[in-house]
Amino acid sequence: MRTSIVRKLFLLTTGLCLSVIASIFIGQTVFFEQYYVHQKVETVKEALQSYRQNELTHDGASQDEVRKEQEFYQKTNAWFARLDDRGQLKYTDDFQMEVRLEDSDIIPALSGKSLVVPLYTVMDVEDVSSDNPFLDTYVKAGQQIAMEGIMFDNHWFAQRIGRSVSNLREEDQLENQQLVKKEYEVVPRFKSGTEYHERYPSVLFRGTITQVRKPQGADVSRYMNRLFLERVKAFQADLLYGDVVEQTSTITDYQENNIDYKIFVERVTDQSGKPAYLFAMTSLQPVNEAAEIMRSYYGYIIAGTLLLVLLASFYYSRRIAAPLLLMDDMTQKMAKLDFSEKIPIKTEDEIGSLSRNINRLSDMLHAHIVRLEQDIEKEKRLEQTRKEFIAGVSHELKTPLSIMESCLYILKDKADSPKRDYYFAAMEDEVQKMNLLVTDMLELAKYESGTYRMQMDSFRIDVLLEKSCVKLAPDLAGKQLQLHHRLVPVEVIANQHRIEQVIVNFLTNAIRYTPEQEDIVISTVEGEDTVKICIENKGVQIPAEQLEKIWDRFYRVEHSRNRSTGGTGLGLAISKQILELHGADYGAMNTDEGVLFYFELKKTKV
């Protein structure tokens, strides 16, 4: 069963497009999330490396640090902070308070000393920046507060703060409503559990706030991300408790409220030779949201894309197959020997080249077939000529041979007959006729073979006509015919010897069939490029239905134009072949008084 190429191309194109869509769908659903995470991680790592090389070589002011953190976020969409060797944010002098401690029996070395407490470790910047009467009342210079923290290597780290009231027990001061709100606690700010409490017990201080600094303007943004600060505090706790592995670079996963995060920590060395840390955190929520939206949107995408694919596949399959269908149609016609149509060539690609080659093949086949048909037709004509030649020869030779046979029979029977000379003369006359007939037949066969080529030259046609008339003067005089000339001196291009043969044949034919004492008129009519030669004889006309047949070999008109008047019956046939080899127009027509034979020759160009 034959399958249409349009269908094949349509199915192939549709399958290919659907495969591409399926690959994109699978790639986005399976690999896109991993690719996004990988690219995100690489982007943050490159940014950290760049910061490490370009920014860590010098220490700047707090405002410069805020600017660098903002630039890092704009570049990578990740939060970034630089930590000191204890895990605290570097440059927190815009968000801190100074507290002068009271005398303490727990750690006498700190009694009466001033202690700087970074406020981001015990409260949120949103509460400080907002109109909070509680903070405005109790977190201000001159206010007595209670602070709880943990000692690490002779360094005290605040964990939570509250208002100090002298008539309350210390336990109540830290557990009742005098504390800053519960959400100010770091959870987990420091480690919990018996082991950690025994190793690092909590220490309670009371003191008086001497100075409070709050961030202003763009500096507030550094402390706005509560989740990021909680991760910084958690890292600080791990660092202080010794749970941080000493590695140059670490990347950890973290999840909060079903949102995934990546945390990057780079351990570096600052100008003073102390260890420092580059801490970055990025959210993977955009890729999750994008993947979820894409999954819900894929139904519309697939429906629209499938429709587009079907339309595009049908269009391109028809467009590509159109020239192939034309080629198929044309080759089918070529198989039926119909070469009338050609394939239009609209492109210069392989299809255009193939179309051009098929057109060329069609032309070549058509030319060869036409030539072959001409050869076959020519061969048929030659075969027909041979048959007619044999038939004509047989017919024409039958009469002289019969006469000669009769004469020989009589001479043999009556050798001393008084008509002996008569019979010999009759046989001689028949032999001459046979010789003339054979000569004419051979000459006609030469012209009809198609291999003879005329050699052209230039000559005066009027001179040639007069010369031919001189040759035939005895015949004209024998029948007392009057010859009239109306000749124009013109040079023509032709084979002079063969044209003379035609003129002699026409004049001989006119003399033979013109009654005695009648007229023969020879004239030339000059045209723009040709000259027309006319030979008209007075006498019996030729029937109209036989005018075309007189050019056939051995054809003779009935009655007066028969073999008894002489001739072989090949003169006009030979003239016809000579004139056709010249490409000349010729013909015969009845006039009011007789018959006119004519032919045209090309004039010599001056």
Image (tube, helix red, strand yellow):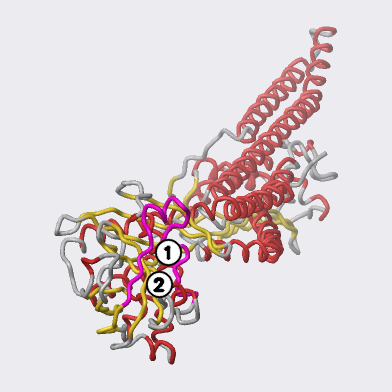
To which residue does mark 1 refer? 189
For the C terminus, give its image quadrant.
bottom left
Q: Nearer the viewer, residue 436 or 85?
A: 85
Q: Which amino acid does label 1 sit on?
A: Arg
Q: In this view, does 71 lie to the left or right of 529?
A: left
Instruction: List x then y, in percent, for residue 84.
Output: 26, 62
To which residue does mark 2 refer? 160
Position of residue 128 relative to residue 197, above or below, is below
> Magenta segment, which residues?
182-206
Whether tag 1 and tag 2 are in contact, CB under 8 A, the answer is: yes
Instruction: List x then y, in percent, for residue 116.
Output: 26, 74
For the N terminus, give its image quadrant.
top right
Q: Residue 31 carries which label?
A: none
Position of residue 147 relative to residue 435, above or below, is below
Q: How busy is the neighbourhood of tag 2: few (under 14 within 10 Å), some, or many (20 plus)?
A: many
Position of residue 134 relative to residue 123, above or below, is below
Instruction: Identify which residue is drawn at 18% across, 71% down.
Output: 60
